Image (cartoon, rainbow, N blue to C red):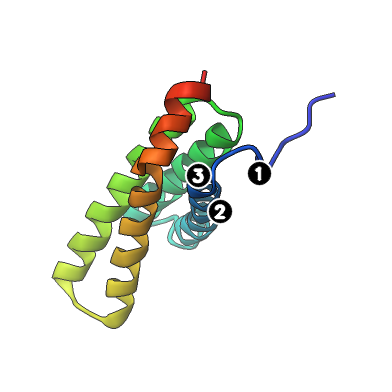
Amino acid sequence: MSRFRWTNPSLPQTLQIAVLLLYITAFFGILRGLIAIGHPLGVFLFLTGLIAFAGAAGIVRERKRGYWLAVLYAVLDMVGEVLGMLDEFSGWDLIGVLLAIALASLLLHPMSRAYYRTWFR
């Protein structure tokens, strides 16, 4: 019987924190997408939330495709946060940009990359 694993204790701490951030952002992305489902941006938010969830689940299962989905999401999140901040600046936008940079940094950290090259299939 196969059970879904939310975390993987054998991952390095950089990837464990990245997985946690991906799950949190996926939840809120899917929620925002469902709230704004009639708007074209709502569909985009929903899909990016699904990408974040798939990336986190892939990292937990040590899959290369999951890692690259997570990196794709991190880059999309950074670009989206910066573009949103350029439109109208607020303190919340700055926090969003910092969290997006933190997620990308965790995923691209040398410890994460070394673990990815060694253990991911």
Query: Which residue was labeled with disc 3?
Result: 15
Please indicate whether residue 64 sits to the left or right of residue 104 in the image: right
Percent x, y of residue 62: 56, 28
Question: Which residue lies at the image location 50% right of the left edge and 52% below the top edge?
Answer: 26
Q: Label 2 vs label 1: CA separation? A: 8 Å
Residue 7 — which label?
1
The total number of labels drawn is 3
**106 up-or-down from 24: above or below:** above
Dot placed on the residue nearer the N-terminal end, 2 or 1: 1
Q: Quadrant of the N terminus?
A: top right
Question: Which residue lies at the image location 48% right of the left edge and 48% below the top edge?
Answer: 14
Residue 91 — which label?
none
Percent x, y of residue 70: 42, 40
Q: Is residue 70 visible?
A: no
Question: Which residue lies at the image location 60% right of the left edge and 36% below the top edge?
Answer: 60
**64 up-or-down from 23: above or below:** above
In this view, the residue in front, 35 or 104, is 104
Dot placed on the residue nearer the N-terminal end, 3 or 2: 3
